[in-house]
Image (tube, rainbow, N blue to C red):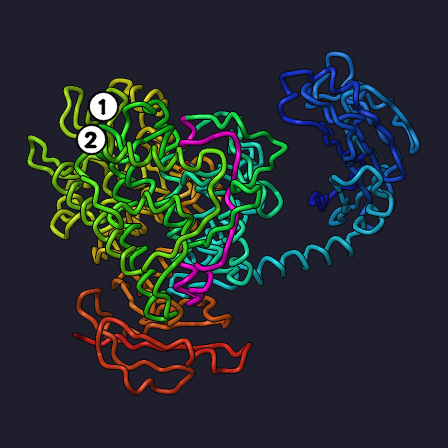
């Protein structure tokens, strides 16, 4: 921190500057439990620049460990002059009955501060630094540097203070830091003609990067988390990272797949090292039904941007612990000594392709059904607060998501066949069970038959698997997955589409733990969820006319402009605890009916994807307008997790919303997409996206090159009335471009340009 104090008055001022920062130096858990006992571990010392605390132990009753981390508060004047005194013990600083707002050491002018080389043990510490008295003439300024540091116990904190503790050094490192972030954020930028919006998007771009670094628990606004990164969040944050950090992402994705278990479930927390996983943050045996759905979306985006189909054939291990049968049973034979990696019966580590991991995640979901033949909700889905319906709950919403995924997988298999010449792929022999059509087709209407088959598979791989692989014809797999996807889509359209007494119609999203359908008319009022609509629209389960009806129902029951957009659900009136804790939250907050931005933005994405561009644009624009209205939202620039009843933004920065906002803008609104490695431009910009000028442009990375696409809209045409006219690449006309909705530019056209060369594409929008 650089603190500058200026005398803006017309008289000379005299003061004694003191900076004080408490040094807590232990786990947040000890704020309540053993706070005093852990203070007895503190070893406190002072050096020339400040106070250092090195606790003796890392306190954990299950197994205390020697502590090797030190915490320090150091200070210096702008010219590097060190402080003149230190008070390292909190109770001495505040005095008996004092407080941090009224510390005795400051209030009592006669109080003295000790010097360097003090040693103390067993107290709460504070980095209270006293500087030499200052005389400040009018218009004069005095600068102080305050350094907070965490380092290895043997860190030379004096050297550290000398390195950073002058105003010159501070300014230099500040510049360096700022430059580093600017570089990163410049990978993706927008010039829409509305400078304020473009700058706001910088903050949105920063959000997924912050969450990748810090997990979900680094700000006081966020009241949960232990620093790890959750499975679902990790995969979705990668969506945005692919748009800005593409180079590192292949490895990141490959590592993440090692978290998948052989039963299709996965470890939920990703540790600090690549490929390090923890089954659950709080050691609870639980499974989220949605987790298996996300990796495909992210992998597909990666494949589309790169064309790297070979990635699907890379091999990776599976995660193993004592949970089997999707945490419905325990493997009594396994022990920690066996290691957290799936082995075969010969004690060898089993490797399967990335494709095999993906197939497994999505195909197991097909068989994992509740009484209504939809995916079991298990311990929750995307909505963490739907956590009370593990027995009878079903998530129709994610049934739709997996249905879309099965279709998506057939596309990838076709690409492998047609582009890579693969006619067969290898799978673990046990997995053939899951491709029932290869050996006499199952009756998909039968819930019992599906569960029996899935259990047969779980039994076959409950401790180890055989290790044998079999070759399966790609065409057979495509046929199998197509049959499954078709069945699911029909099933959902037939069974879960509902109409209420007022004539509005939408998809039911859930069944609760009594096995009762959640949505529709209800004695306490209409029950509708946004989630149930988002994934049916996104996956293609909803037909075009159904999407139209969904929009009307959502506008009627979920849209609340005052709160900043579409709410996650209507007010269920009474506590629907048969579904989850969320319904015990006050209505309009968090997962009970707030404007939960992640889902609202995925709604926008789904609408764009289905061609409902103006409606999608409305969702994004409403959200932006709300976020930038400080009087309403009361947040720094960026997107908060949700808006409460008063429209206030909460849980700022740490939200998957940011990734989806960018993804929607880049791949849908600006329509800059990859198609298995080729570049495709399909703009879905509305007239409102050209607010000031007739051009709107985006800079992103494609094929390792900086790419700027500029849309020129001289006649200010709206979406639906224009088509693509002239297209120029680095000033040269693309000759064989026929007028239409999209331009396809072969990857070679871009990669043949010298590396490092910026690519500029101009697209003129013409009347249709
Ligand atoms: C948070 C969690 C996310 C979860 C969501 C709803 O959302 O991080 O995993 O799906 O709550 O329960 P976020 O803050 O990412 O928008």
On residue 679, the disc is none
**Residue 348 percent location from the top left of the image:** 57, 45
* Quarter of the view holding residue 58: top right
Is 598 positioned to the left or the right of 103 in the image?
A: left
Which of the four quarters of the rendered structure image does ligand 1 lie in?
top left
Q: CA distance from mark 2 to mark 1?
A: 8 Å
Residue 23 makes an appearance in the image: yes
Q: Which residues are magenta?
A: 301-328
Q: Eyeballing the image, is 670 above or below 234? A: below
Q: Nearer the viewer, residue 409 or 546?
A: 409
In reply to whether residue 364 is colored magenta, the answer given is no
Q: Eyeballing the image, is 286 above or below 629? A: above
**Residue 397 percent location from the top left of the image:** 26, 39
On residue 372, the disc is 2
- Helix, strand or loop status at disc 1: loop
Which residue is tagged 1? Answer: 515
Q: Eyeballing the image, is 391 above or below 705? A: above
The residue lying at 55 percent from left, 77 percent from top is 756
In reply to whether residue 304 is colored magenta, the answer given is yes
Q: Nearer the viewer, residue 506 or 587?
A: 506
Which quadrant holds the N terminus? Answer: top right
**Residue 102 percent location from the top left of the image:** 71, 21
Chain-order first, disc 2 or disc 1: 2
Residue 218 makes an appearance in the image: no
Q: Is mark 2 within 8 Å of ligand 1?
A: no
Dots 2, 1 in contact, CB < 8 A: yes
Q: Nearer the viewer, residue 504 or 752?
A: 752
Q: Nearer the viewer, residue 348 or 616?
A: 348
- Helix, strand or loop status at disc 2: loop
Is 767 positioned to the left or the right of 461 in the image?
A: left
Badge 1 crowding class, 10 Å Cα cut-off, few under 14, some 14 to 19, many 20 or more, is some
Which quadrant holds the C terminus? Answer: bottom left
């Amino acid at each position: 921190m650089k603190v500058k104090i200026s005398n803006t008055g017309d008289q000379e001022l005299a003061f004694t500057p003191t900076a004080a920062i408490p040094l807590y130096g232990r786990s947040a858990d000890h704020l309540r439990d053993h706070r005093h006992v852990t203070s007895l571990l503190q070893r406190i010392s002072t050096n020339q620049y400040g106070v250092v605390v090195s606790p003796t132990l890392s306190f954990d009753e299950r197994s205390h460990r020697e502590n090797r981390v030190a915490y320090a508060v150091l200070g210096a004047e702008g010219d590097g002059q060190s402080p003149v005194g230190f008070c390292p013990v909190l109770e001495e600083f505040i005095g008996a009955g004092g407080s941090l707002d009224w510390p005795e050491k400051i209030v009592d002018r006669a109080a003295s501060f000790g010097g360097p080389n003090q040693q103390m043990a067993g107290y709460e510490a504070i980095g209270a630094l006293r500087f030499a008295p200052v005389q400040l003439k009018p218009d004069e300024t005095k600068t102080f540097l305050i350094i907070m540091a965490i380092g290895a116990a043997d860190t030379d904190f004096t050297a550290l203070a000398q390195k950073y503790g002058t105003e010159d050094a501070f300014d230099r490192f500040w510049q360096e830091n700022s430059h580093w972030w600017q570089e990163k954020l410049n990978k993706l930028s927008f010039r829409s003609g509305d400078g304020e919006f473009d700058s706001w998007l910088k903050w949105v771009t920063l959000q997924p990067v912050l969450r990748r670094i810090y997990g979900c628990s680094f700000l006081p606004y966020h009241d949960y988390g232990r620093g790890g990164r959750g499975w679902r969040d990790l995969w979705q944050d990668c969506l945005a990272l692919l748009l800005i950090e593409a180079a590192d992402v292949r490895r990141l994705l490959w590592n993440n797949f090692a978290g998948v278990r052989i039963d299709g479930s996965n470890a939920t927390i990703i540790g600090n090292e690549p490929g390090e996983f923890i089954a659950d943050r709080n050691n609870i045996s639980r499974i989220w039904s949605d987790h298996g759905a996300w990796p495909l979306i992210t992998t597909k985006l990666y494949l589309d941007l790169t064309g790297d189909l070979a990635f699907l054939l890379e091999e990776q291990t599976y995660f193993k612990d004592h949970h089997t049968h999707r945490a419905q049973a325990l493997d009594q034979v396994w022990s920690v000594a066996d290691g957290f990696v799936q082995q075969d019966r010969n004690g060898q580590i089993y490797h399967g392709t990335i494709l095999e991991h993906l197939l497994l995640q999505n195909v197991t979901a097909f068989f994992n059904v509740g009484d209504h033949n939809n995916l079991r909700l298990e311990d929750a889905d995307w909505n963490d607060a739907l956590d009370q319906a593990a027995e009878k709950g079903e998530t129709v919403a994610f049934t739709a998501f997996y249905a879309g995924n099965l279709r998506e997988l057939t596309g990838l298999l076709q690409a492998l066949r047609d582009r890579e010449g693969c006619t067969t792929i290898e799978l673990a022999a046990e997995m053939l069970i899951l491709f029932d059509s290869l050996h006499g087709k199952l009756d998909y209407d039968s819930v019992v038959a599906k569960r029996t088959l899935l259990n047969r598979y779980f039994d076959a791989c409950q401790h180890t698997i055989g290790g044998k692989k079999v070759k399966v014809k790609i065409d057979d797999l495509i046929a199998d997955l197509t049959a499954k996807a078709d069945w699911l889509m029909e099933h959902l359209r037939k069974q879960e589409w509902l109409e209420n007494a007022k004539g509005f119609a939408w998809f039911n999203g859930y069944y609760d733990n009594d096995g009762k359908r959640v949505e529709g008319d209800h004695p306490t009022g209409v029950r509708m969820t946004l989630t149930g609509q988002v994934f049916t629209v996104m996956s293609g389960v909803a037909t075009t006319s159904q999407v139209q009806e969904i929009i009307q129902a959502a506008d009627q029951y979920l849209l609340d402009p005052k709160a900043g957009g579409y709410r996650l659900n209507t007010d269920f009136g009474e506590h629907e605890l048969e579904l989850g804790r969320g319904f015990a939250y006050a209505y309009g907050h968090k997962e009970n009916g707030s404007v939960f931005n992640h889902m609202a933005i995925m709604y926008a994405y789904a609408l764009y994807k289905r061609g409902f561009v103006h409606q999608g644009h409305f969702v994004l624009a409403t959200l932006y307008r709300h976020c930038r209205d400080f009087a309403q939202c009361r947040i720094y620039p960026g997107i908060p997790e949700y808006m409460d009843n008063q429209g206030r933004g909460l849980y700022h920065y740490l939200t998957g919303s940011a990734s989806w906002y960018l993804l929607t803008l880049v791949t849908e609104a600006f329509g800059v997409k990859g198609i298995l490695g080729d570049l495709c431009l399909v703009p879905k910009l509305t007239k409102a996206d050209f607010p000031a000028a007739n051009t709107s442009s985006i800079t992103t990375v494609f094929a390792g090159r900086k790419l700027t696409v500029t849309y020129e809209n001289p006649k200010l045409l709206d979406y639906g009335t224009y088509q693509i006219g002239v297209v120029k690449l680095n000033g040269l006309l693309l000759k064989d471009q026929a007028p239409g909705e999209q331009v396809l530019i072969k990857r070679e056209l871009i990669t043949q340009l010298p590396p490092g060369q910026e690519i500029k594409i101009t697209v003129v929008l013409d009347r249709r």
